[in-house]
Image (spheres, grey):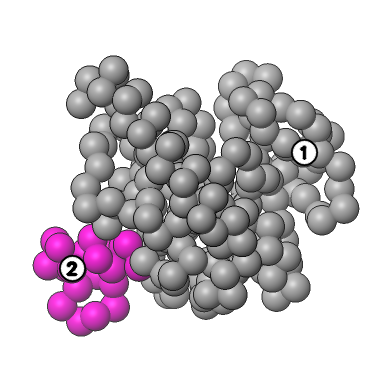
Amino acid sequence: MTADGKSTLRADLKTLREELHARDPDAGETLAAKFPLKLLERYGPIVSGYWPISSEIDPRPLMQKLAQAGAKLALPRIDEDGTMSFRLWHEKDPLEAGAFGLNEPPHSAPRVQPTLILMPLLAFDKVGNRIGYGKGHYDRALASLRADGRIFACGLGFHGQMMDELPAEPHDQPLDWAVTERGSVPIFMMRNFGNNDDSDGTGGNGPSAA
């Protein structure tokens, strides 16, 4: 897909998300109730959420639920060099205005390396391709984290944002899982089924509880 084509796609997906949000502004609370705590048990304890902007589904009810279950929360920050770091965050900690309309922890907040990342999106598909805002911050951060060790990427969105197929480029980092207001989408299992790698039903070579 050309750059112009992808820009048009993002604009269309943003409009779709705005419509979904308008129909169900409380979807974040429904999502939180349906989020499987087994993901925290397997891939916690450090969980990076995000502070919602625009029509993004609100992860804050889920973050509160995870904190009550023992998670250590973090939020992303775009640093001066343009890279994304993850900073420890508690519910009452102050945030500051950052790039792209983000609210993010201050530079003084301690850096952490999350093991479970909750990610916003414009759309995702059944094999984990994700369309974001096109800046590549999450892709670069995930690539770095995956090179260093175990990480589980979970997209949060409306059910209507799940597509049959989305364009992907070699540098794009796939999701392992997604959760919507209708429940979980076990992406890595679906991806491995498609590759005939899941004959024993355990998720094949994807992330596991081991």
Q: Pinpoint residue 146: horizontal percent, then vertical percent.
A: 44, 47
Report whether 27 appears left or right of 182. Answer: right
Q: Pinpoint residue 134: horizontal percent, then vertical percent.
A: 42, 28
Name the residue nearer the viewer: 193 or 119.
119
Q: State yes or no: residue 196 in magenta.
A: yes
Tell me which segment is drawn in magenta.
186-206
Residue at left offset 54%, top offset 67% = 31
Q: Which residue is mark 1?
A: 105
**Which quadrant of the structure image shows residue 147?**
top left
Q: State yes or no: residue 92 in magenta.
A: no
Residue at left offset 86%, top offset 48% = 93
Q: Which residue is mark 2?
A: 193
Residue 108 vs 185, above or below: the answer is above
Report whether 52 appears left or right of 19. Answer: right
Residue 30 vs 21, above or below: the answer is below
Count all numbered tags in the image, as a single digit.
Answer: 2
Report whether 111 appears left or right of 210. Answer: right
Res 160 label: none
Viewport quadrant of the C terminus: bottom left
At label 1, counting other C-alpha atoms closer than 10 Å, the crowd grade (few under 14, some 14-19, many 20 or more) is many
